[in-house]
Amino acid sequence: MVGPYDPGVETLRLILLFVHILGFAALIGGLVAQAGPGEKKVNAAMRDGAGTAFLAGLALVGVLSAGDQEPDNTKVGVKLLIGLVVLVLVMVNVRKTSIPQGLWAGLLALSVLNVAIAVFWSPAHAWA
């Protein structure tokens, strides 16, 4: 089907959105699992979640841009910047035996902020 709605592209968009959400779930889950007293470190869930969320988000923007929908470039830019900061901080610290409490809290705050931007800065969730 050619035109504004292509079932194949819509299926790809939904799969990428699902993978993007799973990436954030892994990232935030890896952070929350370390809540409380004790040493914090970058674990596999954080590493894989940050990479998955970032790459799936880029692919999702590509799919949306290739179709008839034009994503909100300001929102995409803000999410890209936050996601890139999180990804770099995770990857730089992945081999360290521990990370400071402030870095752990910052990663958690930025990750939750990125999800909040996706939910609250979106016409997709508005009443029709």
Image: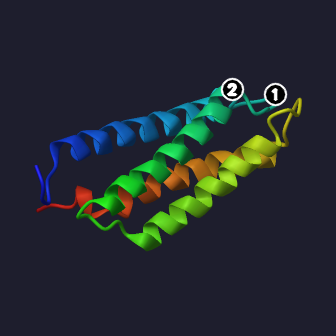
Identify the residue at image location x=31%, y=68%. 70
- Secondary structure, mark 2, is helix
- The foreground one among 113 and 6 is 6
Answer with left or right where residue 44 lies relative to residue 19. Answer: right
Q: How is the image coloured?
A: rainbow
Q: Position of residue 69 (x, y in %)?
A: 26, 64
In whole angstroms, how far apart are the C-alphas of marks 1 and 2? 18 Å
Q: Nearer the viewer, residue 42 or 101?
A: 42
Residue with the mark numbered 1: 38
Task: Give coordinates of residue 49: x percent, y percent.
Answer: 58, 35
What amino acid is at disc 2? Ala
> Which numbered marker is on residue 12?
none
**Residue type, numbered disc 1:** Gly
* Other residues around mark 2 within 10 Å, as few (<14) / some (14–19) / many (≥20): few
Above-or-below relation of 90 to 96? below
Q: Which residue is mark 2?
A: 44
SS class, disc 1:
loop
| Rendered image quadrant of residue 33 | top right
| The quarter of the displayed image where residue 124 is located | bottom left
- Extreme-right residue of the structure: 97
Residue 119 position within the rendered picture, expressed as x and y whole percent measured from the top left = 37, 54
- Of all residues shown, which one is farthest toward the front? 2
Name the quadrant of the C terminus.
bottom left
- Residue at left offset 16%, top offset 43%: 7
